[in-house]
Amino acid sequence: MNFLNSPQEKFRKDTRMNKIEVENLNLYYGEFQALKDVNLKIKEKEITAFIGPSGCGKSTLLKSLNRMNDLVRDCKITGKIRLDGEDIYDKKMDVNELRKRVGMVFQKPNPFPMSIYDNIAYGPRTHGIKSKVQLDEIVETSLRQAAIWNEVKDRLKKSALGMSGGQQQRLCIARALSVQPEVLLMDEPTSALDPISTSKIEDLTEKLKKEYTIVMVTHNMQQAARISDKTVFFLMGEIIEEGDTEKMFSMPRDPRTEDYISGKFG
């Protein structure tokens, strides 16, 4: 669990800028309302955890932050989501540029059926980088950031599909980092992994927050308590409670939050 070590640390966290602001957001799948009047501010270079039972809206909101829900038929959104003050649903917003700035790591590792090297180089190539020297540097830097370089540096030309599940997920994190995003969205990134791989991903995530804003959906209460700075509890499409993780887990304000955290439902 994260503890504030000093008044200076608390001041530093309190003065961080809001990276993402969600204002009066409502989202519908056809007639079904999946998100109801969501208001939320996500600070830069922190880990924000979304928790709540299945179907409560947490993954729906996560996918709205880089407009992945654009791909869902009959999805309608009202309200605003701002990234650095700019409405991402404005008609002028370039969705490809948005997804470069706001990367995504999914629940199950999904490496491309190509070499480890080409998995990482794929994004930079689509954004116009052709130089082998540049690509080599990006591949190494991204794999180092994802704490997997030493495990794969001698087999970069081999298929990514031959890696273990935990390695594949770190590869997918490296792939997301290769285009230098500002925000990293993680949708239950460890739910399909063993405890050792889960621990590696958690350690990695804590290191990455020094450079990136991270938003993570998790069903694992212990994981949220261990690594997140802020936690947001969702129930039936609404935010019930949000705030400092340590405070929420020790003194939740809403009895529904306490019931969920203590395992009475979910």
Image (cartoon, rainbow, N blue to C red):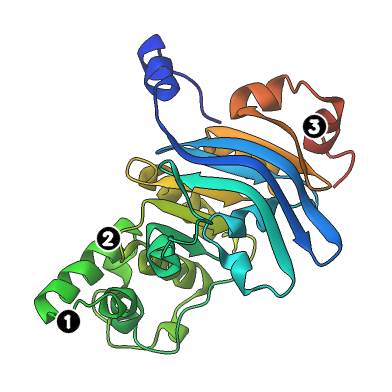
Tell me what residue is drawn at x 24 percent, y 79 percent: 154
| Mark identifier at residue 257 | 3
> Looking at this view, is 20 or 54 the one in front?
20
Residue that carries the numbered disc 1 in the rendered image: 130
* Marks 2 and 3, how far apart at CA: 38 Å
Assess disc 1: are there few (<14), some (14-19) or many (≥20) residues with their C-alpha within 10 Å of its C-alpha. few
**Relative to residue 140, is residue 66 depicted above or below?**
above
| Mark identifier at residue 144 | 2
Q: Quadrant of residue 157?
A: bottom left
Tell me what residue is drawn at x 59 percent, y 46 percent: 80
Q: Which three-letter amino acid code belongs to the residue tagged 2?
A: Arg
Among the two numbered marks 2 and 1 on one chain, the one whose residue lies closer to the N terminus: 1
Q: Quadrant of residue 142?
A: bottom left
Q: Which three-letter amino acid code belongs to the residue tagged 3?
A: Thr
Q: Secondary structure at mark 2?
A: helix
Q: Which three-letter amino acid code belongs to the residue tagged 1?
A: Lys
Which of labels 2 and 1 is toward the front? 1
Among the two numbered marks 3 and 1 on one chain, the one whose residue lies closer to the N terminus: 1
Is 150 displayed left or right of 103 in the figure?
left
> Looking at this view, is 237 or 200 the one in front?
237
Is residue 213 at all visible to an observer of this figure? yes
Q: Secondary structure at mark 1?
A: loop
